[in-house]
């Protein structure tokens, strides 16, 4: 196998992957990109609230110990 065949194989795989993300692939009238966008948005908000909860606990602990400036 030559490098040309190797890189063409990688290119074909990437084209196949990106074609899945186009609006041609639908699932109950929702495109895959629509589902991925809102899924990542939900994961981001869950991560934000988790981080803010930990930050609140650490700030309360620092204030109780008197190390909060």
Image (spheres, rainbow, N blue to C red):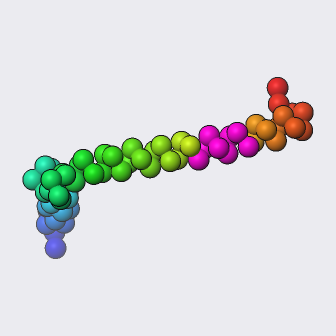
Tell me if 12 is positioned left or right of 54 in this view: left
Instruction: Spot the residue most to the bottom.
Output: 1
Above or below residue 54? Residue 32 is below
Q: Which residue is drawn at 18% across and 62% down?
A: 13
Above or below residue 67? Residue 26 is below
Instruction: Spot the residue most to the top.
Output: 69
Tell me if 66 is positioned left or right of 40 in this view: right
Q: Where is residue 10 in the image (x, y as percent from the top left)?
A: 20, 62
- Depth check: 65 or 17 in front? 65
Is the N terminus in the top left, top right, bottom left or bottom right quadrant? bottom left
Q: Position of residue 49 (x, y in %)?
A: 56, 43
Is the C terminus in the top left, top right, bottom left or bottom right quadrant? top right
Residue 51 lies in the magenta stretch = yes
Above or below residue 20? Residue 56 is above
Tell me if 27 is positioned left or right of 49 in this view: left
Q: Which residue is drawn at 18% across and 59% down?
A: 27
Q: Where is residue 30 in the image (x, y as percent from the top left)?
A: 19, 52
Which residues lie in the magenta part? 50-57
Q: Where is residue 47 in the image (x, y as percent from the top left)?
A: 52, 47
């Amino acid at each position: 196998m030559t490098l040309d065949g190797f890189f063409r194989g990688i290119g074909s795989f990437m084209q196949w992957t990106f074609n899945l993300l186009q609006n041609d692939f639908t699932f109950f009238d929702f495109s895959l990109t629509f589902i991925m966008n809102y899924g990542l948005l939900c994961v981001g908000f869950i991560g934000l609230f988790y981080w803010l909860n930990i930050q609140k606990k650490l700030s309360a602990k620092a204030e109780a110990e008197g190390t909060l400036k």
